[in-house]
Image (spheres, rainbow, N blue to C red):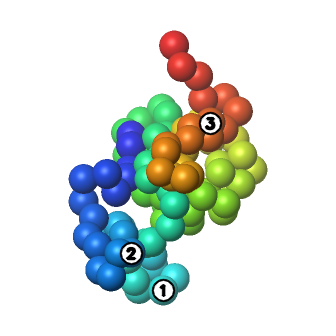
């Protein structure tokens, strides 16, 4: 499953906000993480983890995925480009 802000987002004052809401703040997510893809035995868990990791952001998300052994791929915006950040175990076949 994949979660991202590539389609559902809005901008205010030049700041990009995701449609995802961070439950810790109650506000839309606004960071450099564009997309998270998670591989799991079932879609329900993959979708839940993809959304949670997206909300956590480009530092906390990959760290948690590594700690839990999740198979995840993060796309991070850096200097106008998307950079792939795969977590060990995520394979491109």
Q: Is 11 on the left or on the right of 93, as rendered?
A: left
Q: What is the crowding at mark 2: few (fewer than 14 residues within 10 Å), some, or many (at least 20)?
A: few
- Foreground: 38 or 35? 35
Residues under labels 1 and 3: Cα distance?
27 Å
The residue lying at 36 percent from left, 69 percent from top is 16
Residue at the spot of label 3: 86
- Quadrant (top left, top right, bottom left, bottom right) of the N terminus: top left
- Foreground: 76 or 69? 76
- Foreground: 19 or 40? 19
Tell me if residue 64 comes above or below residue 56 in the rendering.
Answer: above
The residue lying at 49 percent from left, 34 percent from top is 39
- Residue 42, percent across and down? 41, 36
Foreground disc of the pair 3, 2: 2
- The first of marks 1 and 3 along the sequence is 1
Residues under labels 1 and 2: Cα distance?
17 Å
Q: Is mark 1 on a helix, strand or loop?
A: loop
The residue lying at 27 percent from left, 64 percent from top is 9
Residue at the spot of label 2: 15
Residues under labels 3 and 2: Cα distance?
26 Å
Total count of labels: 3
Q: What is the crowding at mark 3: few (fewer than 14 residues within 10 Å), some, or many (at least 20)?
A: some
Identity of the residue furthest to the right in this view? 67
Q: Is 10 on the left or on the right of 63, as rendered?
A: left
- Residue 82, percent across and down? 49, 43
Q: What element carries label 3?
A: strand
Q: Which mark is residue 38?
A: none
- The quadrant in which residue 71 appears is top right
- The first of marks 1 and 2 along the sequence is 2
Tell me if residue 65 comes above or below residue 16 in the rendering.
Answer: above
Residue at the spot of label 1: 25
């Amino acid at each position: 499953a994949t979660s991202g802000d590539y389609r559902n987002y809005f901008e205010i004052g030049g700041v990009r906000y995701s449609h995802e809401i961070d439950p810790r703040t109650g506000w839309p997510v606004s960071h450099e993480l564009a997309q998270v893809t998670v591989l799991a035995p079932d879609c329900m868990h993959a979708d839940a983890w993809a959304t949670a990791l997206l909300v956590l952001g480009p530092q906390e998300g990959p760290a948690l995925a590594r700690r839990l052994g999740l198979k995840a791929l993060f796309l991070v915006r850096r200097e106008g480009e998307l950079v792939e950040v795969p977590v060990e175990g995520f394979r491109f076949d």
